[in-house]
Image (spheres, rainbow, N blue to C red):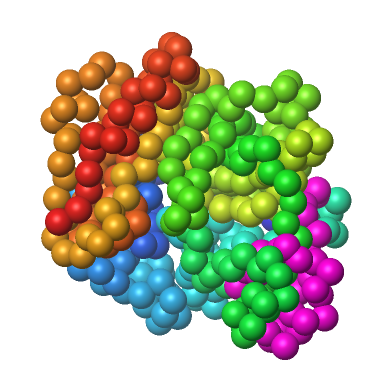
Amino acid sequence: MEETAGIGHTTSVTSRLFRGEVRLGIIQGGQLGRMLLQPCMNFGITPYVMDKDPSAPCREFCEHFFRGDARSREDVYEFGKRLDMLTLEYEDVNLEALVQLEKDGVRVHPSPAVIKTIQDKGLQKTFFHENGIPTSEFVLLNTADELSRHKSFLPAYQKLRKSGYDGKGVKKLVSDADLKNGFDEPSLLERSVPIEKEIAVIVARNVSGRMETFPVVEMVFHPGANMLDYLFAPAELDDAVRDRAVRTARTIARQMEVVGILAVEMFVTPRAEVLVNELAPRPHNSGHHTIEANMTSQFEQHLRAILDLPLGSPDMRSPAVMVNLIGADGAAGPVRYDGLEEVLARPGVYIHRYGKKICRPFRKMGHVTVINDDIGEAKRIAAEVKQTVRVGV
């Protein structure tokens, strides 16, 4: 198997890790890359970061920063060829370059094969269907004209197969009148299902195939922006539902041969069905609370996995609530944060500013994690944080 064949090289990389000789590249330097820098420092890794934005959040904390476009074959290849290992903060990256780098001996985690599947929501859904992973019913479309053949699917969600994120590239189609507004691009039409809760499971798998799973979390989405608003950890679920969600996430990680972190977003229906929605093969918004709330953060766990180190304990130190800090409606210009001092006066409140210079409406600008032994109290404090902190201009 590929894993076995790669263990020798990875062991060599691991032996050099603690001599400070590992050259690890991170493609794109946004907030996820920025939060990955801290465990790099803890492990004595000097990271190399590539991003097309000269003021990317990683820039001020990274000695080896390179300008480059993740979608450019030339930029990705030129960046990666000098390194031992590559990882990424977002899967919108040039696959041809990664395939060639892997052939040249650079370790790429997640693998190009995993990235190819997850870049395309249609391939994701097909993978679920072919491997017996429960998911909502769907059909694949190429043009808007095909929507009229599937009126029986309504109400439904049409999702672009590529490049959609944080609610972008998604349209809700309720009636025949909505069909004229559908995407005229390759997409999938997903039958709407009743949802009681939206949950996520983050599973880590290292090169040797060992896995650890973080406790299941509940996600509450912003009604206007269709992006994560609150996160509750752990999720309040029946044991049977929780176990089914964990088993499903571990099955996907094993079947896809993921190396690193895999975030699995799921729906829980009123009938206690667990349906997989989407995947992300890297640290994810649904795991930010792990920095303060868990024995090992998702970012450290990702490094441990791709370096084939022993995986850390994912157990929780404390229940937690995370609040995304997003740009206020109408904000456009240099960012300003109001209310931070007031919320910092509270015990158990941790602020993360992402270092983005420009604020836009609903842009992710930071997050706040609240830890408390009483999840109800953590929710109350988090709601006050949401009302107090304003991110604008």
Residue 157: quarter of image: bottom right
Foreground residue among 175 and 148: 175
Residue occupying the point 31% across, 67% down: 51
Give the image location of residue 42, x and y in percent: 31, 34
| Residue 61 painted magenta | no
Residue occupying the point 81% across, 36% down: 271
Asked if residue 145 is positioned above or below residue 31 in the image, the reply reads: below
Residue occupying the point 59% across, 60% down: 111
Give the image location of residue 163, x and y in percent: 52, 71
| Residue 150 painted magenta | yes
Asked if residue 154 is positioned above or below residue 78 in the image, the reply reads: above
Give the image location of residue 40, x and y in percent: 33, 42
Residue 267: quarter of image: top right
Foreground residue among 51 and 233: 233
Quarter of the picture containing the C terminus is bottom left
- Say if residue 63 shows up in the picture: no
Q: Residue furthest top?
A: 373
Start-end of magenta stretch: 133-161
In the rendered structure, the answer to whether residue 75 lies left or right of residue 157 reads left
Residue occupying the point 71% across, 53% down: 256
Residue 224: quarter of image: bottom left
Give the image location of residue 349, x and y in percent: 28, 24
Asked if residue 157 is positioned above or below residue 319 in the image, the reply reads: below
- Say if residue 237 shows up in the picture: yes
